[in-house]
């Protein structure tokens, strides 16, 4: 595989080029499909899929049935610098399909994964519910066994790619009550399934998102991913593999915001001299750079730990917490540096400010990451 720095640089180039093409899109669905098509055309989607299932070979960095977190982070960091929609569609193909590889559903995985790599099918990850976001054991969507397979009833919310996805990997309850961690299972739910309804809504940074309403949706036995009772482990396995990449994308958004600030402050004059000559603004730039550098190191360390299958829970939480909070602060400073231009719809820093905000919430809020870190610290033996 390409070296990680080179992969990141190339991803940024294609991201910037894609942003120009997406600018002419007719709405967010069209933008999403354009982004996915361009990623597939240049074979970038393969970095979000395991090599054994249509992904790109990582030259031994990870086993063939796994996604390299280091490679994925390099790609997301680069894409985020160039195009937020490209970053989103890249990761969702992996996030929405990885349970198929984890669950050992070889026939179904081999049937579908090639289409995900080619961009001819769109994947989505459907686990969140109104009462089950940070704690997935609270999932209440029901899956009842039938002669044919399973009948699903319930609702999911905040599902990226809702309405454009061809397949949803969905977490549902086969036994017990909400709070029971052992009664869950993962399913592939085709978008064409009778009784599946999509309700769309809008969020700050435009992308396809909405609710799934399951009204006695019938799926086949082969659509069960893994076994009954393995659902929570599969869902957490997916998140555990992909969460670090959220931090990587945050760093990418922050780095682009810093570059925009540098360009603006060096060319804009006030009181007869460039804004970059003012000490207070120079202090800002120095702190933006330092925080982003530190975030990048945390991301690299966490990704390496995951790929090498070392204990990574606290490392990933630190990276996700610090990188997303840092990126939010950096993008906010970049808006401030641009003054009125910073809040004008369509400017780069205004777009970055909106795109980076959700990263502190999804795949585990900042508060959840703090709880994980604290739990890790408190579990350590007390030193004399």
Image (spheres, rainbow, N blue to C red):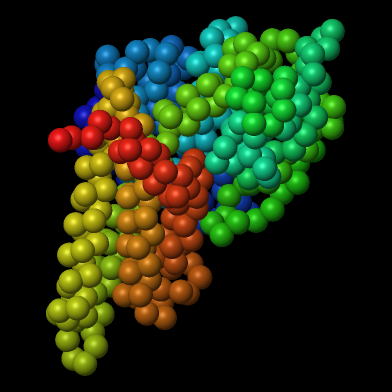
Residue 250: image location, x then y, percent: 37, 49
Q: Is residue 302 left or right of residue 341?
A: left
Classify residue 4 by image quadrant.
top left
Number of numbered discs visible in the structure rendering = 0
**Image vertical order of residue 165 relative to residue 287, above or below:** above
Residue 260: image location, x then y, percent: 30, 64
Q: Nearer the viewer, residue 129 or 1?
A: 129
Q: Quadrant of the C terminus?
A: top left
Tell me what residue is drawn at x 65 percent, y 22 percent.
184
Residue 377: image location, x then y, percent: 30, 38
Tell me what residue is drawn at x 54 percent, y 21 percent.
234
Q: Nearer the viewer, residue 47 or 180?
A: 180
Q: Is residue 113 left or right of residue 20?
A: right
Classify residue 227 by image quadrant.
top right
Residue 182 shows in the view: yes
Classify residue 261 by image quadrant.
bottom left
Tell me what residue is drawn at x 59 percent, y 12 percent.
226
Tell me what residue is drawn at x 23 percent, y 56 percent.
291
Residue 71 shows in the view: no
Residue at the bottom extreme, as displayed: 271
Residue 124: image location, x then y, percent: 60, 33
Q: Is residue 281 left or right of residue 253?
A: left
**Image vertical order of residue 234 relative to residue 346, above or below:** above
**Image vertical order of residue 267 relative to residue 53, above or below:** below
Q: Nearer the viewer, residue 83 or 366?
A: 366
**Image vertical order of residue 174 relative to residue 82, above or below:** above
Q: Is residue 48 left or right of residue 308?
A: right
Q: Quadrant of the N terminus?
A: top left
């Amino acid at each position: 595989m390409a070296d990680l720095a080179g992969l990141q640089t190339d991803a940024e180039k294609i991201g910037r080029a894609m942003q120009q093409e997406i600018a002419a899109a007719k709405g967010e669905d069209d933008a999403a499909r354009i982004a996915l098509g361009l990623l597939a055309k240049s074979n970038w989607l393969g970095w979000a899929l395991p090599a054994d299932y249509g992904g790109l070979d990582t030259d031994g960095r990870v086993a063939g049935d796994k996604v390299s977190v280091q490679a994925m982070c390099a790609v997301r960091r680069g894409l985020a610098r160039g195009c937020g929609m490209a970053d989103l569609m890249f990761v969702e193909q992996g996030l929405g399909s990885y349970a198929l590889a984890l669950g050992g559903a070889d026939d179904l995985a081999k049937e579908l994964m090639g289409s995900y790599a080619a961009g001819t099918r769109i994947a989505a990850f459907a686990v969140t519910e109104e009462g089950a976001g940070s704690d997935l054991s609270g999932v209440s969507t029901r899956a009842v066994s039938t002669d044919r397979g399973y009948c699903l009833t319930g609702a999911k919310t905040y599902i990226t790619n809702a309405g454009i996805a061809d397949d949803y990997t969905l977490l549902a309850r086969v036994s017990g009550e909400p709070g029971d961690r052992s009664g869950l299972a993962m399913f592939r739910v085709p978008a064409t399934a009778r009784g599946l309804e999509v309700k769309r809504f809008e969020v700050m940074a435009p992308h396809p998102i909405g609710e799934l309403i399951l009204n006695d949706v019938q799926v086949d036995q082969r659509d069960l991913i893994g076994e009954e009772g393995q659902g929570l482990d599969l869902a957490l396995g997916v998140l555990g593999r992909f969460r670090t990449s959220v931090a990587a994308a945050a760093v990418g958004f922050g780095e682009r915001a810093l570059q925009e600030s540098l360009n603006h402050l060096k060319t804009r004059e006030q009181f007869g001299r460039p804004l970059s000559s003012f000490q207070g603004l120079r202090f800002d730039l120095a702190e933006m750079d330092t925080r982003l550098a530190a975030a990048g190191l945390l991301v690299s360390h966490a990704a390496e730990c995951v790929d090498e299958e070392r204990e990574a829970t606290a490392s990933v939480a630190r990276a996700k917490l610090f990188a997303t909070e840092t990126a939010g602060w950096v993008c906010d400073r970049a808006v401030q540096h641009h003054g009125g231009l910073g809040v004008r719809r369509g400017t780069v820093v205004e777009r970055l400010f909106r795109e980076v905000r959700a990263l502190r919430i999804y795949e585990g809020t900042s508060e959840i990451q703090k709880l994980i870190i604290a739990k890790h610290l408190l579990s350590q033996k007390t030193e004399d």
